[in-house]
Image: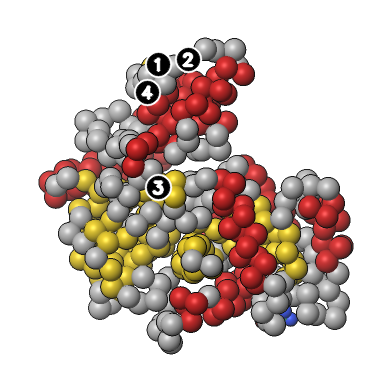
Amino acid sequence: PETISIQELANRMSERSVDVIKFLMQQGQMMKPGDIIEPDLAELIASEFGHTVRRVAESDVEEGIFNVADNVENLVPRPPVVTIMGHVDHGKTSLLDAIRKTSVVSGEAGGITQHIGAYQVEQGGQKITFIDTPGHAAFTAMRARGAQATDIAILVVAADDSVMPQTIESINHAKSAGVPIIVAINKIDKPGADASKVRNALLQHEVFVESMGGEVLDVEVSALKGTNLDKLLDAILLQSEILELKADPTRTAEGVVIEAQLDKGRGPVATVLVQTGTLKIGDIVVAGDEWGRVRALITDKGAQLKEALPSMPVEVLGMQGTPLAGDRFAVVESESKAREIAEYRQRVAREKQVAKSAGQRGSLEQMMS
Ligand code: GTP
Ligand code: MG
C-alpha cells in the first residue's frame, strides 16, 4: 500500500507541516516531518484539513500523474477561487456580471462573447477567481468530482425570497467540502427586501453571520444597482487572507475541468482551473480519459496567453476529445504517456460499465476508489 511522509502530505495540501504535526499531537501522536504514515492516517489528516482524498489507482500507467508534490520552498500566494451558489433566480449571475463590470480589469474587456463559466477580476491589485454555477445539477456534478476547486463559497440569498431549498443544499455542499461561506444578501433594492429575515433563517441552518454573534461574513448587496460590491470583494479578500492560500507555480500544472464542449470551429474546448503549477502552450495534458497538447490558452476576456498561473481559469484548445466537467487534469511528460493513461482510463471506464450491468461492482469499485 502507498505510504507518504508528513512533509509530503503537508505539501500536497499546501499546509505547513508544523500544523499537521500539531494536529497529530492533539491526537496523542508525536511525529516528525520526515515520518512515514499509513494511507488511513493520511486520509484522516487530509479530511481534518478540509481536503478530499483521492487515492490514485495502483497501476503502473497512473504512476507519476497527480503525484508530483509541491516544493514548500516554491510556494507563493495564489488568488482565491470563489464559487457563487444559491437558489435559482436569487441573482448569482447578475452579481457576477456586476462585479466584473466594476472591476478595473474586466472594464477593459469590451464586448467579447464569453461562454466560459469562470472569471478573474482584480480588487485593489489582488486577483479573485470566480466560478458561476449556472444550474444546480451542474454545480452538484462539479462539487462531487472536482471537490478541491473552491476556496470560498458565496451564498447568494435574495432578500425578498429568503432561504429556499437550493440555498440549504448549497450550505450543505459548502459545509461538507469544508469551504468557508460568505453570505451575499442580494436584491436589497426591492420593496419586499428583508435582510434580517434572511439572517434569522440562516441561523436555523447553522450559518451564523457576524451580526448574530457568528463568524460568517455577510454583505447586503444589490446586483441590479451595484450596491456594496466593493464590500463583498473586501470580505472575500479578508476571508482569503485567513486561508493563506498558496501554490507552487514552478511545477507542472494540475487542476480541474470546469466545463468542456465541442466547438465546431475550434474542436474540443476545455475550460480548466489551474490549481497548482503553470500550464503552458505545448504542454501535454491528460484530463479524465482524454488527452491533448495545449495549442492555445485563452482567458475569459478573450486574451491569448503563453501560460496560465495557479488559480487562473483558462480555455484550453488542443484536446483530442472532450473531457467532462469535474475531471482532473495534469501535465505529463510525453505524448505516449498521455495516450497510455487516456486509453487505460477509457478501458477502465468501459470495464466498470460492463461490471455494473453484470452486477459485480465490488472489486472494480475498489480498484477505482
Ligand atoms: P440561476 O442561474 O437560474 O440559478 O439564476 P441566478 O441566481 O443566476 O439569477 P440571475 O442573475 O439570472 O437573476 C434572476 C433575476 O433576478 C433576473 O431577472 C435579475 O435581473 C434579477 N436580479 C438579480 N439581482 C437583482 C437585484 O439585486 N435586484 C433586483 N431587483 N433584481 C435582481
Ligand atoms: Mg445564473
User: Along the line of sight, which residue is nearer the eye, 330 or 122?
Assistant: 122
Name the amino acid, label 2: Met
Residue at label 1?
35
Q: Secondary structure at mark 3?
A: strand
Quadrant in the picture for the N terminus:
top left
Q: Residues within 10 Å of mark 4 (few under 14, many from 20)?
A: some
Name the amino acid, label 4: Ile
N-terminal label among 2 and 4? 4
Residue at label 4?
4
Residue that appears at 28% across and 77% down:
264
Residue 157: x and y in percent read 73, 65
Q: Residues within 10 Å of mark 2 (few under 14, many from 20)?
A: some
N-terminal label among 3 and 2? 2
Name the amino acid, label 3: Val
Q: Is residue 46 above or below residue 251?
A: above
Residue at label 3?
76
User: Along the line of sight, which residue is nearer the eye, 231 or 275?
Assistant: 231
Residue that appears at 34% across and 66% down:
315
Residue that appears at 28% across and 45% down:
251
Q: CA distance from mark 1 to mark 2?
A: 6 Å
What label does residue 31 carry, if any?
A: 2
